Image (spheres, rainbow, N blue to C red):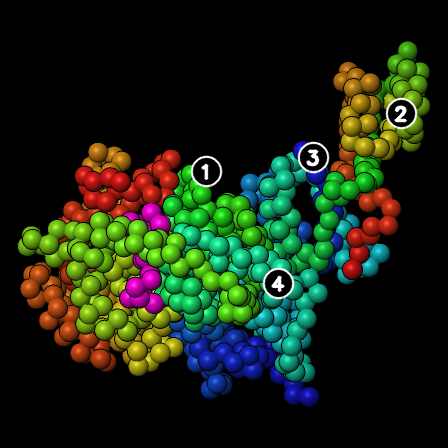
């Protein structure tokens, strides 16, 4: 058997696991590992400029490909800098393995230089974690980590490795296990057939059904199945923020996103529905509004791979624990074989009602924002972006108003195209995650929709884009303020803009880009927006930053009335309420 | 309602902290907690008591089951079970008190396991309620120190918590 040192073993195990890219940043406790990286060619390391960037890049890579993202950081500050990105991945159930260096075994617990209890610090935000006690265990731990990260409800896994474990002096027999068995970990696979039959019965009897689909459908590779099911039944579909793209956004049956900034038709249809087919969703508070008033007449079918997600906040009438793919496959077969058909008349009437809602306040039947002024409206930027990229770009985003505008107006037709921090809401996510996406799809158009606030949270990664030729396009909706904070201050704090304005402190983004060797473009006029965006995407091999000066007073609508509103209670504009 | 949850967990470093962390992270309370290795040295058994309605307990057991180190668990309070707690208590025992405390120990079927001229160390086992009752009977005035093990439990009859 081949004899390898701990460091070499780690790299070989990554290779044998099929890892192609590792996003990381070196440091003392990880030096043996970095030396092992230097001596091999199979695993490519991408040097970020801050460990947070590494985690978001690996996260974007994972979201765009479905593969596990891999991160390598050193101990102490390297590890703690990775925490925000790990929490981001945890909240959105993204498969990721984070390898952190640790001080040498015999120093652990002595408050050694750059020592942090990484397993302890990361504990609440990981699916699982390992502390390596012996180099001989590395292959098995790596195998287990990737297995745990990618199966069941995916999530981040930390492997903490003390420096002495990876030392070059000592070698150990290396063999990569073909599979692992963990006696205490048996993620759900097939759903209960009886429950699925019950669900199909409910669906076929329904008169006002809605399919409410989320990130689990994308993670579980169930988009095609879900689309077939919805098409076959002619049922309306709404997506969560995380689920956008799991059903074609430009399709007639798509109602748009639901929830706090969901469309009028999606939220209203949910409220009035009699059966909700919830797939890969978790009834997040940004969806349900006041739980006690949530969809009062609906029977709820809830499919999820994680039993703890079911009946956590909203009780399910028909819970189905299983992988989305297997449950939907079975469901689809049952619907096809069933002698019963959905009630055609009732469904027709339901669609008539929904179309009436769409006409009244829908986002896609007419512009629901001011179009006569001189200012560039942020909504128009996203619509033009969609037009210029033919709806075919990978779009990452940061967090705030621009994120909601992107979610509302860039209609995603394919899964894994919309990459955003939904659960944790991490500003700074957009640029590094776009790098990860571009690393996975070298030829694809990758746009990072951001704001002048968010972009400054991980702006150092512009240098990484230079180093690895990652020509992402940064679409910055610059409104000179923390837009969403300001919106809330308008709505709930009588316009007292506490610490949400930048005054005159914004950098000259064009010059900043130039100093990194990128292209910066400032857009101030409405009539030049489309041409400038076309120019931007024509520069295929350059990083381009579009500093788009948008209307500074615009709010995101619709917006749920909170607290104590129901799904259908929304602000539709600054003055109009349902 | 008080629940007794027994958990078989991998006897691995950090496993207990994951269980305890889960409770604080999600805002659940642990009333008592005991943990020790089992006859199978790769497994530890945790017994913990917590208070909550059915919904809360369901969430607790689901989240415990999600922890990779948790192998198996059972909510003992769902069926007939035996509950025991051990208490060691040091009390003043001089003068007239000495005989009175001794009588009390006999009534509760405890044992005096250490004696000096002025105090007793008493050992007593039973349900938590019984231990509470004993403390009340002896009275605050004479109690010097109390140590309780936390609840251990096992189901009655055929049911077995094992791999």
Q: Is residue B13 left or right of residue A90?
A: right
**Which stretch appears magenta?**
A248-269
SS at mark 4?
Answer: helix
User: For residue A252: magenta?
Assistant: yes
Residue nearer the viewer, B133 or A220? A220
Q: In x, y percent, where is residue B149?
A: 78, 38
Mark 1 and mark 4 in contact? Answer it, CB < 8 Å: no
Q: Bin the neighbour count of mark 3 within 10 Å (Cα to Cα): few under 14, some 14-19, many 20 and up.
A: few
Distance, label 3 to label 1, CA atoms, is 26 Å
Looking at the rendered structure, which numbered label has been put on residue A292?
A: 1
Residue visible at 39% across and 67% down in the picture? A231
Task: Give me the chain letter of mark 3.
Answer: B
Q: Nearer the viewer, residue B4 or B29?
A: B4
Q: Quadrant of residue A1?
A: bottom right
Task: Please rate how many residues cluster around mark 4, counting C-alpha atoms within 10 Å: few if below 14, some from 14 to 19, many from 20.
Answer: some
**Secondary structure under the numbered disc 3 in the rendered image:** strand
């Amino acid at each position: 058997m081949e004899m390898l040192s701990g460091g070499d073993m780690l790299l070989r195990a990554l290779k044998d696991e099929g890892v192609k890219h590792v996003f990381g940043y070196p440091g003392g406790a990880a030096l043996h590992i970095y030396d092992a990286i230097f001596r091999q060619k199979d695993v490519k390391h991408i040097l970020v400029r801050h460990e947070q960037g590494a985690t978001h890049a690996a996260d974007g890579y994972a979201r765009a490909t479905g593969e596990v993202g891999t991160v390598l950081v050193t101990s102490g500050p390297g590890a703690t800098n990775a925490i925000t990105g790990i929490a981001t991945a945890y909240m959105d159930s993204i498969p990721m393995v984070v390898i952190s260096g640790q001080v040498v075994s015999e120093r652990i617990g002595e408050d050694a230089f750059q020592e942090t209890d990484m397993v302890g610090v990361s504990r609440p935000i990981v699916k699982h974690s390992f502390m390596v006690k012996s180099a001989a265990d590395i292959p098995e731990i790596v195998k287990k980590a990737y297995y745990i990260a990618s199966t069941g409800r995916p999530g981040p896994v930390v492997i903490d490795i003390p420096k002495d474990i990876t030392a070059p002096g000592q070698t150990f027999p290396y063999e990569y296990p073909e599979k692992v068995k963990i006696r205490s970990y048996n993620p759900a696979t097939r759903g209960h057939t009886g429950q699925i039959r019950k669900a199909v019965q409910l669906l076929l009897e329904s008169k006002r059904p809605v399919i409410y689909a989320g990130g689990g459908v994308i993670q579980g590779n169930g988009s095609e199945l879900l689309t077939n099911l919805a098409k076959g039944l002619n049922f309306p579909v709404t997506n969560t923020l995380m689920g956008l793209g799991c059903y074609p956004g430009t399709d007639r049956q798509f109602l748009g996103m639901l929830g706090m900034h969901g469309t009028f038709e999606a939220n209203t249809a949910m409220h009035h529905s009699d059966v909700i087919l919830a797939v890969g969703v978790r009834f997040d508070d940004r969806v349900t509004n006041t739980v006690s008033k949530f969809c009062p007449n609906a029977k709820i079918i809830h499919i999820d791979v994680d039993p703890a997600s079911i009946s956590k906040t909203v009780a399910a009438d028909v819970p189905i624990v299983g992988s989305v793919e297997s449950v939907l496959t079975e469901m689809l077969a049952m619907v096809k074989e069933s002698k019963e058909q959905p009630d055609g008349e009732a469904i027709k009437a339901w669609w008539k009602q929904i179309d009436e809602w769409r006409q009244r306040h829908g986002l896609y039947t007419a512009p629901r924002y001011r179009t006569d002024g001189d200012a560039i409206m942020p909504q128009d930027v996203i619509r033009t972006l969609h037009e210029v990229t033919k709806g075919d770009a990978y779009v990452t985003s940061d967090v705030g108003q621009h994120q909601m505008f992107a979610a509302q107006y860039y209609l995603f037709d394919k899964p894994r195209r919309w990459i955003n921090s939904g659960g944790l809401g991490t500003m700074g996510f957009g640029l590094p995650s776009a790098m990860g996406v571009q690393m996975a799809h070298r030829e694809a158009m990758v746009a990072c929709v951001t704001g002048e606030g968010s972009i400054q949270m991980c702006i150092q990664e512009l240098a990484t884009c230079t180093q690895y030729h990652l020509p992402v396009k940064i679409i910055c909706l610059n409104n000179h303020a923390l837009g969403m904070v300001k919106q809330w201050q308008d709505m709930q704090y009588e316009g007292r803009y506490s610490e949400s304005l930048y005054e005159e402190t914004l950098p000259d983004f064009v010059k900043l880009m130039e100093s990194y060797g990128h292209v910066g473009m400032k857009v101030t006029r409405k009539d030049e927006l489309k041409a400038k965006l076309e120019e931007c995407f024509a520069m295929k091999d350059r990083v381009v930053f579009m500093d788009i000066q948008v209307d500074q007073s615009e709010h995101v609508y619709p917006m749920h009335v909170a607290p104590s509103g129901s799904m259908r209670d929304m602000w539709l504009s600054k003055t109009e309420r349902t | 309602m008080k629940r007794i949850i027994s958990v078989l967990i991998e006897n691995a470093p950090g496993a207990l902290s994951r269980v305890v962390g889960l409770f604080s992270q999600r805002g659940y309370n642990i009333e008592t907690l005991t943990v020790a290795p089992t006859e199978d040295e790769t497994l530890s058994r945790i017994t913990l008591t917590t208070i909550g309605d059915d919904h809360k307990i369901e969430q607790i057991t689901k989240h415990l089951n999600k922890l990779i180190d948790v192998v198996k668990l059972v909510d003992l309070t769902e069926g007939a079970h035996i509950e025991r707690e051990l208490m060691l208590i040091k009390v003043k025992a001089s003068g007239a008190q000495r005989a009175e405390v001794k009588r009390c120990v006999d009534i509760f079927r405890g044992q005096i396991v250490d004696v000096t001229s002025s105090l007793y160390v008493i050992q007593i086992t039973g349900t938590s309620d019984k231990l509470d009752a004993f403390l009340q009977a002896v009275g605050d005035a004479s109690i010097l120190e109390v140590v309780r093990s936390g609840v251990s439990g096992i189901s009655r009859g055929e049911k077995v918590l094992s791999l």
